Image (tube, helix red, strand yellow):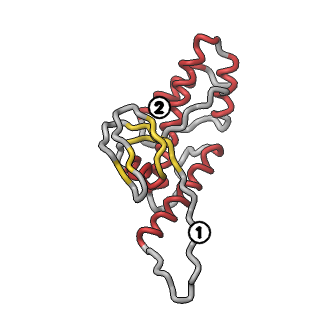
Amino acid sequence: MLSYQELQSIYHRERKTPVLQRLPDDFYRSITVLLAESEERHREHIKKLAADVVSRRQHKILLAALRTDEKTPENLLKDEEELLKNAYALLSTHRKRILAPSMPSARSKTPEPARPKINVSVKIIRPLPEVADEEQTYGPYKEGDVASLPESIAALLLSKGAAEAHNPVPSTI
């Protein structure tokens, strides 16, 4: 079982280093247990620590996915593998669409079905002016704002260090 002191130690290690830190395999389940067994007055602080650890780990995983080698980062937890896999797939599809746009062939008369628009929640870490895609304008944003943006804009902001992944810890854990 994870203790408050262990969570604080994990929080500090994740903050200090750019790589994923070694965590217990049951880390995410342990947060739920720690919250359930903690006094009410400590729960909000534990949630904030846990949310920061989760956010930092997601950021590191997304940065790993931005590298084109598709190498699995060390210390990736089972619970995080799907995020990495989906990020690789999303970025790979995006790279292919940008770097090798398909020209409509004479044989192909049916248009490709539109891909559903996927939004990604990010926390803005520095002030930003308006940003736009083909369909809409977003912003401006100030530091600390949380925004749900199309995947292409979110990936750009993450890669430029203007935002970090934001996935709030649900209130049930």
Q: Quadrant of residue 113?
A: bottom right
Quadrant in the picture for the N terminus: top right
* Amino acid type for the residue under numbered disc 1: Pro
In x, y percent, where is residue 143?
35, 33
The front one of 31 and 152 is 152
Asked if residue 87 is positioned above or below residue 148 in the image, the reply reads: below
The front one of 56 and 96 is 96
- Position of 129 compared to 173: left or right? left
Give the distance between the C-alpha atoms of the residues marked 2 and 1, in whole angstroms: 45 Å
Residue drawn at x 58%, y 55% is 86
Quadrant in the picture for the C terminus: top right
The front one of 37 and 143 is 143
The disc, 2 or 1, on the residue closer to the chain's N-terminal end is: 2
Residue drawn at x 44%, y 49% is 154
Asked if residue 134 is positioned above or below residue 59 in the image, the reply reads: below
- Report crowding for label 2: few under 14, some 14 to 19, many 20 or more residues within 10 A (C-alpha): some
Does the residue at mark 2 contact the one at mark 1 (Cβ under 8 Å)? no
User: How many dots with numbers?
Assistant: 2
User: In the rendering, which numbered label is found on residue 169?
Assistant: none
In x, y percent, where is residue 59?
47, 43
- Report crowding for label 1: few under 14, some 14 to 19, many 20 or more residues within 10 A (C-alpha): few
Q: Residue furthest bottom?
A: 106
Residue ID for mark 1: 113
Secondary structure at badge 2 equals helix
In x, y percent, where is residue 128?
31, 41
Asked if residue 160 is positioned above or below residue 48 in the image, the reply reads: below
Secondary structure at badge 1 equals loop
- Position of 141 compared to 49: left or right? left
Residue drawn at x 64%, y 27% is 31
In x, y percent, where is residue 136?
41, 52
* Amino acid type for the residue under numbered disc 2: Arg
Residue ID for mark 2: 13
